[in-house]
Image (cartoon, rainbow, N blue to C red):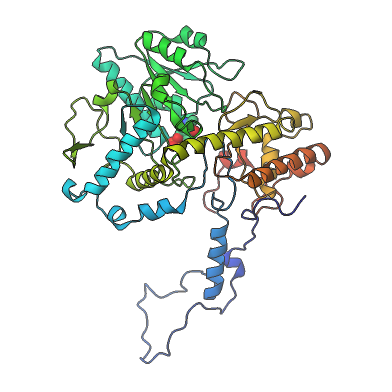
């Protein structure tokens, strides 16, 4: 295989400190003792802990090298479909670290936190404008919590009309969190199949929509990277039966400044600031899943809400129909600062351009790899494209084999085996922040791997062979996990 593709971030080797220690090595020096020795008391005496003997430089190098094993978007391309792993400019970190933001206590009285409250109010309006909705809550900590918040809003709305309903329609292409959020709110998710083009048909929705159904959850563009073209007709069908339309906006990166989600028919929509609005994610750290709503859902939004009067910002809990709090204080404020910085530094035109480039990059990959990998829905895509392992299966090579081999080429694998409607799915989302050069390198790696699948499938079955951790027994890891190291 070629040596220079990708990065080497995944291919380091490092022994345990216990393996590299040498008896008698020491990481510190103390001055000569100038007092008489005294015995330790009984409890403290003993052999001490079994630690390896190491010098300072041994320890520093060990941990510095370990820190380099951490693959991230700052190390290389991270084409994880549905996750929008775009590069986060460092400017936003600097803004979030400004003392006035980072150092302000959430219990400060509003008159001492005017800047922070203004930022919240302005970010709410910016997100409402970008989506074409009327108001926003920034409280939810992630997309999934935004979904639950949206479900609670829908429940509160139907209850206020005196007709609480019991079901939610969820397409088969939906992210797993969609039916989970509906169920967590007490709704029964009703599945609906997408059609041969990978999208929802209005007829399929009309068949299951009834007056016991609170609404539908639609991801647009959907998780196949395809635009739900029938969304306005679907929204009309749901609205006609008194239901509401929930938008999963996790894929907003494809349509910023291009599509008006409000006019598309959504009543409530979540965004993932850690995906679309360029704040760090992937390490399980804080995120933000704001929820934007149309006017008729505003009374139910979580409290406290920031209220502005004559240039003064205050926090108000005086919304009797609200669903309560969904997060302490006002959500993950540091993430909100980063997203605000991103939106203002980009401006409207560049947000639109970012989406256009994200879509262009995905279509470029789709057209270059079509024929190398099987393309189940052969039509222009949005910001991500979904292939399958159908061609390689003939050589007994699977999606898992191919993406494990991709690690040998130094790339983080794309999302695999999702969405569930495609057998052996390989879902690639390059985002707008990748250059043509890095995208070409990924394409080249996939081509080389498809070639290896033909000529030397052993390489793929045994991949990764160049990484620190080789092929894992994933079933064993799930069935009998070893949690003690
Ligand atoms: C990421 C994602 C979610 C969940 O968002 P989190 O912020 O990870 O909780 C929901 N739906 C879709 C389509 C997603 O891609």
* x, y percent for residue 176: 49, 28
At 74% from the left edge and 54% from the top edge, which residue is drawn?
Answer: 3
Q: Can I make out residue 54 in this image?
A: no
**Res 431 quadrant in image:** top right
Question: In the picture shown, does residue 446 fall above or below 380?
Answer: below
* x, y percent for residue 396: 76, 32
* x, y percent for residue 483: 52, 49
Q: Does residue 367 appear left or right of residue 217 in this picture?
A: right
Question: In the picture shown, does residue 66 fall above or below 259?
Answer: below
Of 19 and 419, nearer the camera is 419
Of 197 and 211, nearer the camera is 197
At 23% from the left edge and 27% from the top edge, which residue is drawn?
Answer: 322
Question: In the picture shown, does residue 65 fall above or below 181?
Answer: below
Q: Quadrant of the C terminus?
A: bottom right
* x, y percent for residue 214: 36, 15
**Res 399 quadrant in image:** top right
Q: Can I make out residue 198 in this image?
A: yes
Of 96 and 36, nearer the camera is 96
């Amino acid at each position: 295989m070629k040596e220079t593709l990708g990065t080497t971030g995944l291919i380091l080797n490092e022994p345990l400190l216990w393996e590299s220690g040498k008896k008698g090595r020491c990481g510190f020096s103390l001055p000569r003792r100038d007092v008489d020795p005294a015995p330790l008391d009984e409890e403290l005496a003993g052999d001490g802990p079994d630690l390896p003997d190491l010098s300072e430089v041994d320890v520093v190098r060990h941990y510095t090298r370990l820190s380099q094993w951490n693959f991230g978007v700052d190390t290389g391309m991270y084409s994880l479909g549905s996750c929008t792993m775009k590069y986060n400019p460092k400017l936003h970190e600097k803004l979030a670290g400004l003392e006035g933001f980072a150092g302000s206590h959430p219990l400060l009285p509003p008159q001492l936190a005017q800047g922070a409250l203004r930022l919240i109010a302005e970010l709410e309006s910016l997100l409402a404008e970008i989506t074409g909705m009327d108001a926003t809550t920034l409280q939810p900590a992630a997309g999934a919590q935004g979904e639950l918040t949206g479900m609670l809003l829908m429940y509160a709305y139907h209850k206020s009309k005196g007709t609480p309903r019991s079901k939610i329609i969820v397409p088969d292409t939906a992210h797993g969190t969609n039916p989970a959020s509906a169920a967590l709110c007490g709704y029964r998710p009703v599945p609906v199949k997408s059609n041969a083009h990978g999208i929802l048909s209005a007829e399929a929705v009309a068949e299951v929509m009834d007056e016991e159904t609170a609404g539908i959850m639609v991801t647009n563009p959907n998780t196949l990277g395809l635009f739900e073209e029938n969304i306005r007709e679907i929204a009309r069908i749901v609205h006609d039966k008194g239901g509401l339309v929930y938008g999963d906006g996790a894929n907003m990166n494809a349509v910023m400044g291009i599509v008006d989600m409000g006019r598309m028919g959504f009543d409530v929509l979540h965004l993932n600031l850690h995906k679309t609005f360029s704040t760090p994610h992937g390490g399980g750290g804080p995120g933000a899943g704001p929820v934007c709503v149309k006017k008729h859902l505003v009374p139910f939004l979580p409290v406290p809400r920031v209220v502005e009067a004559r240039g003064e910002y205050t926090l108000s809990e005086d919304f009797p129909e609200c669903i309560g709090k969904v997060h302490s204080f006002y959500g993950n404020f540091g993430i909100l600062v980063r997203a605000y910085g991103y939106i203002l530094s980009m401006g409207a035109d560049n947000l639109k351009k970012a989406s256009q480039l994200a879509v262009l990059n995905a279509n470029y990959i789709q057209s270059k790899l079509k024929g190398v990998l099987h393309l189940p829905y052969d039509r222009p895509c949005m910001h991500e494209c979904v292939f399958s392992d159908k061609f390689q299966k003939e050589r007994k090579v699977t999606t898992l084999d191919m993406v494990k081999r991709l690690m040998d080429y130094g790339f983080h694998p794309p999302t695999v085996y999702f969405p569930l409607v495609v057998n052996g799915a390989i879902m690639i989302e390059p985002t707008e922040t990748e250059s043509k050069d890095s995208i070409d390198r990924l394409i080249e790696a996939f081509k080389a791997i498809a070639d290896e699948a033909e000529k030397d499938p052993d390489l793929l079955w045994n991949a990764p062979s160049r990484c620190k951790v080789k092929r894992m027994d994933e079933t064993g890891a799930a069935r009998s996990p070893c949690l003690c190291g």
